[in-house]
Image (spheres, helix red, strand yellow):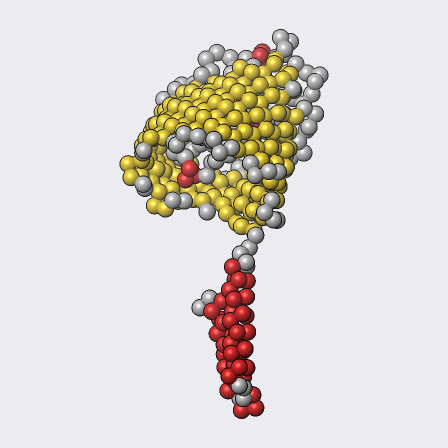
Amino acid sequence: MTHKSIAKSTLFGAITFALAQPALAVTDEEFKALQEQFNLLAEQVEENSKDSTSDTTIGGYGELHYNNWSDDQGNTFKELDFHRFVLMINHEFNDDIRFFSEFEIEHATIEDTDDGSSNGYVAVEQAYVQFDLTENTKANAGIFLVPVGILNETHEPATFYGVERNPVEKNIIPTTWSEAGVFLSGHYGSGFSYDLALSSGLDGGTNIRGGRQKGSNAVANNLAATARARYTGVPGLVLAATAQYQDDMTQDTSDDIGSATLLEAHVRWGIADFTLTGLYAYWDIDVAATASQSDIDKEKQDGGYIEASYKLHPEWGVFARQNQWDNGGAGDTSKEQTNIGFNYWPHEYVVLKADYQIQNDVAGSFDGFNLGVGYQF
């Protein structure tokens, strides 16, 4: 029985009991008045039950991976890893102000070890307040995901193919990439939207992935400005392009590494059950001729992939993806990886995955299969 039904029964029972007492004999007019009061009270109970929904919501996602690879020299890599466990707590203060957050534990276990051997870590991936400025414009302040690429903002396991996130967005963009700052976004009925962000920048020199500060005592001598334009006005089509500029990649003007520009573009085109995705990202880092050779070799870094997927059934999908990326360095540094596999969704938010990967020698020449299970709620 619902709370509303219980409240109605209690009110009706109390009135009936009162009317049944000899000392409380009432006229027809008094009885009708009591009935009207009962109906009003019942309506109030029903209205209150509608308004009792909490303004705070909880969500999350997670994924378990199994990797089984081997290279040309007979070296093997076999591992089971609960890669991510994420909880999301969101709250709506009123119709115009709300809060979003993601709290992540990676690799299942966090240990306090003297030698730093613990694999896991805890991170606040998002924690920002959002304000509605107009019907079409929102402002965010806090730690947020940088608006670039496909996976950086949408990376729940049930939303993409392949057990592991693709290596291009991992090593070039570099997903998952969150920074602290302010973020303005707008959207229009035509399908056009834009995002403008001013945030903490990278602090790793030519080491793109190692430079993510994630709002943790982030050095803010040189901020990063990011702009994205996106178009979704045609059903099944997504077009997007992002540009970011940072004045100094080491947050220190006294060294040999200066500014950097990131350019990224992607397209996703879905026709019925077939989807084709393409993405390309490019870094141009200003490295002085007096810098170390290892940094000079990494002043240009880029990567891209093409993916084709087909839904055989609402619960089954197959895909093939060709990845190429280059983080620079001496000699031939162009890495390639091919993935083919399938996803099975027994539920819209639960997915089982399997894929086979083939790498070139530069990428490690690790060929083998990956298995995974993921969920979101």
Measured from the top left, where is residue 180 in percent x and y? 63, 34
268 sits left or right of 89 in the view: left
Measured from the top left, where is residue 254 in percent x and y? 71, 16
Residue at the spot 54% in from the left edge and 84% down from the top edge = 18
Tell me if residue 336 can be seen. Answer: yes
Residue furthest to the bottom: 22
Residue furthest to the top: 289
Measured from the top left, where is residue 170 in percent x and y? 49, 28
Front in this rendered view, residue 70 or 277: 277
Measured from the top left, where is residue 375 in percent x and y? 43, 44
Image quarter where the N terminus lies is: bottom left
Q: How many marks?
A: 0
Q: Is residue 291 above or below residue 77?
A: above
Residue at the spot 51% in from the left edge and 83% down from the top edge = 28
| Quarter holding residue 131 | top right
Residue furthest to the left: 312
Residue at the spot 65% in from the left edge and 20% down from the top edge = 248
| Quarter holding residue 286 | top right
Tell me if residue 357 can be seen. Answer: no
